[in-house]
Image (cartoon, rainbow, N blue to C red):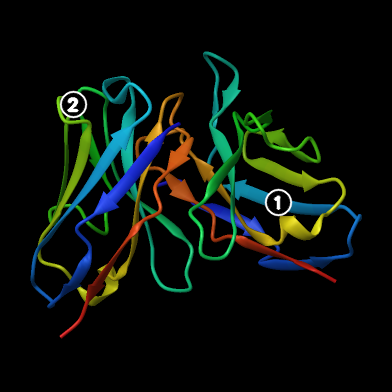
Amino acid sequence: DIVMTQSPDSLAVSLGERATINCKSSQSVLYSSNNKNYLAWYQQKPGQPPKLLIYWASARESGVPDRFSGSGSGTDFTLTISSLQAGDVAVYYCQQYYNTQRTFGQGTKVEIK
Amino acid sequence: DVQLVESGGGLVQPGGSLSLSCAASGFTFSNCAMNWVRQAPGKGLEWVSSVSSSGSSAYYADSVKGRFSISRDNSKNTLYLQMNSLRAEDTAIYYCAKALGGGYFDDWGQGTLVTVSS
């Protein structure tokens, strides 16, 4: 199985400041035949199901604010919230869909400082 | 609008069985792979199982292989999860999730709670 490791486990950021979450996979999730990274990011607010933010490592889902961006390739990925808003308080998960055994990172809790 | 509505959760004793359903609407169900993802109380997300759009291929996490069985009925727009030999560690909210594209989960249900306890 591909192990996904996120860092940090939690972070506190001031309103309007940048939040950066890292995700590392135990093997590459870049599929060479189409040059796509099989990596997604989700946001989960308390009491709600997860919501898709980013897929193919950097493609923003429809309706997701452009302050959310994804980057990286191969085994190292980043989710950036460029200017944290109060409504962005949540737990964020990365997930690989490179192989049929899908796996998630352990989650990163984002709070307001 | 896409709707995924899970049902069938509840309290079951260790060693028991439970069957979950996910009723889908608002999209072409037969075009999408479907998935079950669970979340133990206060914990992170764990992928449980996936089934292809036709139902011909199914995949399972090692933690449930041999005990859980995923299936679908495209004529009824419904996804199922048969859970046998349940353990305390299977206690979780079970979400059904749709995967239209390459395998990312673009829509999720609200979940159904399964509690395994004596």
Q: Secondary structure at mark 2?
A: loop
The residue positioned farthest toward the top in the image shown? A33
Q: CA distance from mark 1 to mark 2?
A: 38 Å
Which labelled disc corresponds to residue B115? none
Residue at image x 72%, y 45%?
Answer: A79
Residue A97 in the image: state x and y as whole percent. 46, 36
Which residue is found at the position 68% from the left and 30% from the top? A58
Q: Which residue is mark 2?
A: B74
Amino acid type assigned to the residue bearing label 2 in the image: Asn
Which percent across, then down, holds residue A96?
50, 40
Residue identified by numbered label 1: A22
Q: Nearer the viewer, residue B92 or A105?
A: B92
Is residue B94 toward the left or the right of residue B41 in the image? left
Question: Residue type at mark 1?
Answer: Asn
Q: Position of residue A13 (x, y in %)?
A: 84, 64
| Image point (26%, 24%), residue name | B53
The residue tagged with tag 1: helix, strand or loop?
strand
Q: Residue B90's quadrant in the figure?
A: bottom left
